[in-house]
Image (spheres, rainbow, N blue to C red):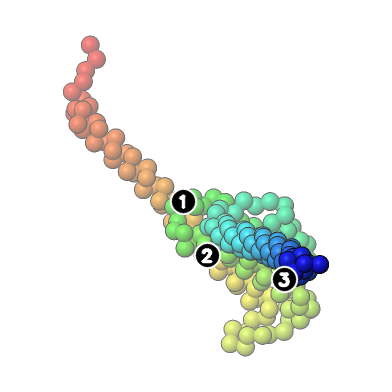
Amino acid sequence: MSFFTLLILLSLILIVPIIFVMREKSKTTQTESTQRHQEYLASASIIANQSQTNTASIEKLNNEQGNELCVIHFSANHSFIKLLYNEQVPKTFRATMDDIGQQYESTHHDQITESQLFTLNKLIATRIPELIADYLSLDQNYAKTVIIDTDKQNTSYDMVLAQLNLILDFSQKLNTQSQSGVVDKLLASRRYLDDVYQESGMAADNLKIK
């Protein structure tokens, strides 16, 4: 065997394994790269889903906060209405609640401030149901006989009724305020028409029918 042939054989012995090693390394690198890319896509998908969830939660919260300023539309499923027809609630409580509901429905809600409407909504939708639920959790004999406010000699029954009457008084005042707002609009309309008549000369009866 010539020296040149031997040199070629030695070169092949050295080069072929290197080629195989490099090819396997390339495959490994490509596989790792593909895996990292898939992990990146999965991570990005999770982040996007979390972002959508957070956005939806924020929108829901904003909607709930905005709904608090909307006018309450009473229905059979509303907590206030359920209590209004709950026979476990004392009749005097229900009568006062009925008056509160009537005052609310007859109020011109666009004639009171957002703060006033927000407070009134909270009282009707949250405070009154909580108040009645707390009262109903008491033993009825205890609620009507045991003095819990020694200064005013009030029982639990007396205190709840007093609070309901305060809410009724508040709703009545807002109702009166809203009616006055509408009256002001009517008066402004009449003044406008009076001005129109004055400017047209009709007020002086200058126009005569022939």
Residue 52 image point, x, y percent: 62, 58
For this view, does 77 lie left or right of residue 123?
right
Residue 140 image point, x, y percent: 78, 76
CA gap between label 1 and label 2 equals 14 Å
Residue 124 image point, x, y percent: 61, 62
Toward which corner of the image does residue 204 lie, by quadrant?
A: top left
Circle 3 crowding by C-alpha within 10 Å: few under 14, some 14–19, many from 20: few
CA gap between label 3 and label 1 equals 31 Å
Please tell me the numbered disc located at residue 133: 3
Say which residue label 2 marks: 119
- Give the quadrant of the N terminus: bottom right
For this view, does 4 lie left or right of residue 202?
right
Which residue sits furthest top? 210
Toward which corner of the image does residue 163 lie, by quadrant?
A: bottom right
Say which residue label 1 marks: 110
Q: Residue at x 68, y 78 (%)?
A: 156
What secondary structure is found at the residue carrying circle 1? Answer: helix
Q: Earlier in the sequence, mark 3 or mark 2?
A: 2
**Along the viewing direction, whichever of 42 and 35 lies nearer the viewer:** 35
